[in-house]
Amino acid sequence: MNFSRLCATAFLCVLVTAGSASAQGLLDSLTSDLNIRGMTTTMDPETGIATVTGDVHIVYGDVEIRCGSATYNQTTGEVVARDGVTVWRAGTIYRGDTITYNSVSGEISGQNVVSGMPAGPGMFIYKAEDFQSKSRLENRIEANNVTFTSHDVQNPNFRLGAKELTMIPGESATLRTVKVYAGDTPFFWLPKYSQAIQNEVGYRVSPGYQSRWGAFLLTQYSFIHGDHTLARYKMDLRSQRGIAGGVDFISLRHMSNRQNFGTLQIYAAHDSDRSTNQAGTVRFPIPENRYRVNFQHRIYLPGPDVSTWYLDFDINKISDIHFYEDFFFNDFRTNREPDNQISLVNTSDAYVATLMTKFKINNFYRTTTRLPELSVDFTRRPLWGTGIFHQGTISAGFYNEVLGRQEEEELRRLQALGFGGNLAAVQGDPFNGVASYLALAGRPRDASLTAADVNTGLGVIASRLQEPDFARFHTYHELLYPKTYLGWLNVTPRIGAGMTSYASIDGSVTGLESFTRGILHLGLDVSFKLTRSWSDVQVESLGINGIRHVFQPYLNYSYLDAQQDMGVPAIDRLSPTTRPRSIDVPLFTAVDSLRSWNVARVGFRNLFQTKRDYITANGYGTFLEIPNGGSEQTYTWAGMNTYVDVFARDPEFGRDLSNLYNEIFWRPVPWITLRSDMQIPITGGVGSFTELNNSIVWMPSRHTSLEFGHQFISDHPFFQDSSLLYTKFYARLSENYGFAMNHVFEADDGTLEFQSYNFTRDLSSWVASIGVMARDNRNGVSDYGILVSFTLKDFPQFNFDLDIDPNPTGRGGRQ
């Protein structure tokens, strides 16, 4: 006890006969930081305990207590509250018969305590016969004989009863010796149940019907192992496909650091109907026992997670090429042929060095192997205060492209079918040989097949049957000298040089064994800005607080001399795209497809800016309030980028001019975002085509969201004509009801490709949803289904299982 309290206690002994008013005044003087008020107050001078009764109100820091009576021990700092106790601390409410609060340690304990805890978008409530909240430093709650539920009524319709509860607020809750009750009837027992507060855990059951699966029942039970791993156990039954199940393990050790990861997914199915083929394409043989094993993990060396060295694992083993298509449709859409690689990475401010081994463990699709590859990417950095910047890359490795067994069989079948330009045989093929040869010839799938297309396709087949194999060394370095002239003209000349050397070439169509080329690049970036402001323009409904127009013309000139011998096989090559190619050589990853070019990208940007006390967290209208002492920040309200490529040498199509590109965005307020990306042809010929991509996301009210988009493409050399419209709609009809629907319509041939309708109902402890979907695969076989889902409300994650209803948006949802 300190000296001041000793003196106060001695003085208290002299005033032992003082009345309650004197005792209250003395209590105030002894507990200046802890404010206690009540109708009557008495003091015991021997024990130093004050007793307060009658509408007691106690305030200490962020803690507030209301009760019928209470005692305060000035020696221990302990407050014992009785008779209808309510405690508020840091946003959490505790109610009970008797609650003890220690003002020194911050501990709370009591009997028959009722409290709650936010859980994601929901809330759970628990009642404990014996309750103890540890000190502020430990941040842990322990309780015995607990009832745990999300149904905030006296007699909940769903609850968990447990002998022990251990909870870390904001992180997880663990119950031991658990009984699951429906009303007062126990129907399930668990030795242990762990629940993460901010993660998708708990129990979910989803019955339904899907044309690929028949009637099905999907179940998932998720909980925390220890304090480090979220586990999702799955057991599924499909009437047409049999029984299946698996588990997902997700590491929680580094949840605050998104650069760390650790996942293991295991799923197996005993498929009783492998003949189902909704896509209508060639179906390769499928084993009866099917599975996936996906492992992604990062290990820091030697640790901890701030180390600049780490080891990445990305291992994906699947039983057959159709497994994702049949059971995990969303993975099939995004990554149907996953890579397998292990990488050792070292990072610094100057570079990122990677030693990668990429290998083949799934032998049914084409795989590029790197056994191994060492690469060093140098970040753009100044050189010794000269004003000159350097950036570049070095890579070396052994590369091989291995055919998938089934792809090889199909290519050889097509080769034999069209041998000698046999147009009639291809046209009579029952396995869609016409579509295959049109694709090989780079022609639209609705075109008429000709003998020339067959001969072109045979040449492509012969090339694809080669399995290129070579050693390669590649390096490129670039110097930049950014300067500003006259205070407004930004000029950045660039000069770069490098080389690519190939050795031990196997698979060249010309028999080439080695090849070395030099790379020379000259570039020039020129830009300037013109601005004008109108500070008196105020439009509150559109979020305008003054407006500034920024006009920025720019020129990006690039000359590249990188001649290529056509006998060199390509592994890192260009992929078909509608977007303009990068003319920044350090960003050009298709090393084997580098071709000489001479191009000037000319354009101008228009930006409209205003002042706000918040800025966007991303480019899609999500707003983040940033306190800054009342100062306002510049916010880009709308913008447009218009440009064209002028070719002296076009490496792809031999054009003089590219399409005219125009990119527009408008995000005036958080509830509306508009984007428009357009390109229209200026001249004719190959490579000139039209593409229009427009979308708007609009929330007309707090309870309604609408997204509408249109994707149009015409006359592209690789992609078929399309005019695709899509819509996504969600409405919160009331506190308990919600409705969503999605549509994808191909106007080019009048096909409603996809449609889904989802309806949700809040059932107190559960969230129930029901939805239907249908997809037109254009092969006479429609894909349709119905899904019913029940999810514990404690941690509601309402959404359709993406493998049932992928909710496609635009062209990404097409098969």
Image (cartoon, grey):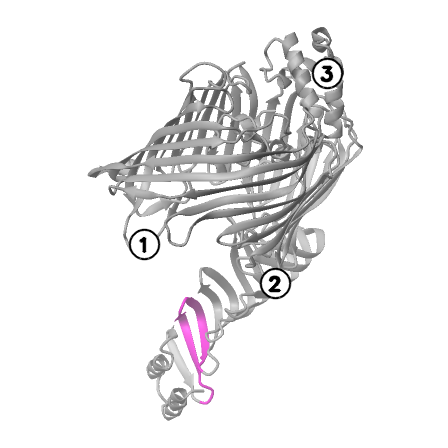
Q: Residues within 10 Å of mark 3 (few under 14, many from 20)?
A: some
Residue for badge 1 = 628
Q: Amino acid at mark 1?
A: Asn
Asked whether 542 falls inside the magenta stretch, the response is no
Q: Residue at x 30, y 44 (%)?
A: 634
Mark carried by residue 431: 3
Q: Secondary structure at mark 2?
A: strand
Quadrant for the C terminus, please: top right
Image x and y of residue 655, in percent: 46, 19
Gap between marks 2 and 3, in whole Å?
A: 61 Å
Q: Amino acid at mark 2?
A: Thr
Q: Secondary structure at mark 1?
A: loop
Gap between marks 3 and 1, in whole Å?
A: 66 Å
Judging depth in this view, the residue of 772 and 113 nearest the camera is 772
- Looking at the rendering, the stretch of residues picked out in magenta corresponds to 46-74
Q: Residue at x 35, y 29 (%)?
A: 603
Mark carried by residue 166: 2
Q: Earlier in the sequence, mark 2 or mark 3?
A: 2
Asked whether 61 falls inside the magenta stretch, the response is yes
Image x and y of residue 306, in percent: 54, 59
Q: Is residue 721 left or right of residue 419?
A: left
Closer to the observer: label 3 or label 1? 3
Q: Is residue 182 visible?
A: no
Image x and y of residue 437, in percent: 66, 15
